Image: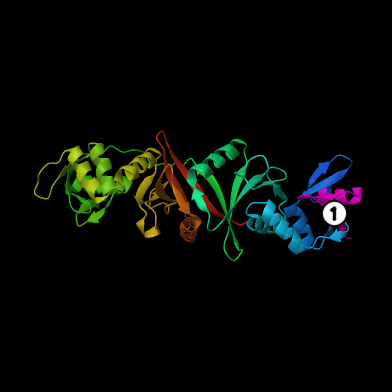
Amino acid sequence: MKIFGELTGDKIIIQKPKDVGRLYNKSHFGKPLSGNKLELDLIEGIFLLDEGKNKIKKGKNEADFEKLVSLASNKIPHFEIKYLVFKDLRKRGHAIRLFEKDKSITFSHVKNQFYVIVFSERDELDLKKVKITIENITKQGKALWIAIVDEEGDITYYDTSILDIKGNIKANKFPKGRCVLLDNRAIVFDKKLARVLFEKEFFGKPFGEWLQISFVETLYLNKKGIVEITTSSDKKLSKEKVNDIILKGQPDIKQRLSVFEDLKKRGLIVKTGFKFGSHFRAYTKGPNETHAEYLVHVVHEDFKSIWGEISRAVRLAHSVNKEICLAQISKSKIDYIKFGRLRP
């Protein structure tokens, strides 16, 4: 038996108490009004019409699907992608409704278990705004889902959160040794130091009997006073000179170093993530005990991107059983913002 509604402005009013009970009490549609009436928004009304569960009238005439979609397109920003997500989640059994209290959020679950933000694949990711939303929702003990609608109407869902990444690698004391700076890396020519750096915290990679280390590892160990840096002609370099030389070859090295240091403080082993399309891969345990759990990409506080870049990063991380985190650097801290594939 179909439910009848009256189109009034941009709302649909259900008047029969029996219909109100079916929609609101059983299926969590609409907002109760005085006089035991129910108000549906256009997305809800169009969904029910599309499902063949209601008829909508405007005066003496029946409002068809095309007219309602045209009206909704004029009244609701980005109506079509919001509708596609609403329809998909409703058919999956998730009772959601438009969220009117905060424009940064699209839908809320009726029992407040999670919130949803809807984007088109052509929309911009503003990481600062997303992080603020995550923080606000986390304080409520709720989850945030992000739904991306592509140009064919397919939907990809991500769950997002700020991770407190921690590992169980204890800091070690290392002997001091000499390190030679080359064009793209440095070589530790002290055999004992080379061995313990690799065995205890997996620094670098063997280079014959010695150890090759990356620029970020070089700066880290030099800053710690563990390696003394020289040129290939055995000229000693000051820390400032080492910084200047490496900065010319790798302009973003300061940002990468700050994240590298932070991850080391958190007890993780940190290696390059280049083969996975990120700056670092991070292990909570030794590489002989586990694979890297995280891929970490370093970004600045005002980072913006297209969703296609996030899609590629998440897809790759998922394919190798890792989680992708954007390490957002601000003046006061580093936040690790995770984007993970979600199947609602």
* Residue that badge 1 annotates: 5
Relative side of 315 to 254, left or right: right
Give the residue at x 34% y 43%.
Answer: 255
Q: Which residue is most to the top? A: 332
Figure check: 246 above or below 58: above
Dot 1 crowding, Cα within 10 Å, few <14, some 14–19, many 20+: many
Relative side of 220 to 66, left or right: left
Relative side of 188 to 312, left or right: left
Q: Which residue is most to the bottom? A: 152
Residue toward you, 181 or 119? 119
Residue toward you, 295 or 104? 104
Give the percent coordinates (x, y) of residue 244: 21, 43
- Please name the amino acid that badge 1 sits on: Gly
For the N terminus, the quadrant is: bottom right
Give the percent coordinates (x, y) of residue 276: 40, 58
Relative side of 56 to 80, left or right: right
The boundaries of the magenta stretch are 1-24
The colour scheme is rainbow
| Observer able to see residue 153 | yes
Q: Secondary structure at mark 1?
A: strand
| Observer able to see residue 86 | no
For the C terminus, the quadrant is: bottom right
Give the percent coordinates (x, y) of residue 12: 80, 51
Question: Is residue 10 shown in magenta?
Answer: yes
Give the residue at x 31% y 42%.
Answer: 254
Question: Is residue 146 shown in magenta?
Answer: no
